[in-house]
Amino acid sequence: MTDDRVDAGFDEWLRALVTEDSYYLECEHGHGSLPPRRVCPECASTELSEASLPSTGTVDAVTTVHVPTPAFVDDAPYTTVVVDFGPVRLTGIVVDAAPKTVEVGDDVEPSVGASETTGDEVLVFRPT
């Protein structure tokens, strides 16, 4: 189910990721967050600037989903990971790797893929 609405900030962030201009938001105190944000979720600072997202991150948590929500029914089974990029963590789906082959501590790189169920763009990670 796609529509013409844009998730203000997040869709722009996904497009930047594809063009290798990936970024996160950083407040004056060094806390990282992802758009869309107007206020730092850690300290409430309104002084946010764009900082370059590292090209790779480290898997902090991993799970294989066998019983998905309806929005991902055709994608299952798939592996979801939480990836540490230093100031920010990102959650997405692993591609180009069989389920249960990615482990905590593995390095991955972010990219944009499409849900097999909806065709919507989703954040994906590829093993490096």
Image (cartoon, grey):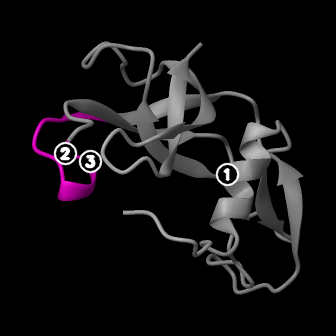
- 2 with respect to 30 (left or right): left
Nearer to me, 18 or 31: 18
The residue positioned 51% from the left and 36% from the top of the image is 124
The answer to whether 3 is drawn above or below residue 84 in the figure is below
Distance between mark 2 and mark 1 Cα atoms: 23 Å
Q: Are marks 2 and 3 in contact (CB under 8 Å)?
A: yes
The type of residue carrying mark 2 is: Val
**Mark 2 sits on what residue?**
73
User: Label 1 to label 3, Cα distance in Å?
Assistant: 19 Å
The circle drawn on residue 72 is: 3
Residue 33 visible? The answer is no
Disc 1: which residue: 14
Q: In this view, does 82 lie above or below 39?
A: above
**Dot 3 amino acid type:** Phe
Q: Would residue 64 be counted in the magenta stretch?
A: yes
Q: Give the range drawn in magenta.
A: 62-73
**At 68% across and 74% down in the image, what residue appears?**
36
Q: Residue at x 82, y 86 (%)?
A: 46
Helix, strand or loop at mark 2: loop
**Viewer can see residue 116:** yes
Q: What residue type is labelled 1?
A: Leu
The tag earlier along the polypeptide, 2 or 1, is 1
Between 5 and 90, the residue placed more toward the observer is: 5
Residue 125 rendering spot, x and y as whole percentages: 52, 30
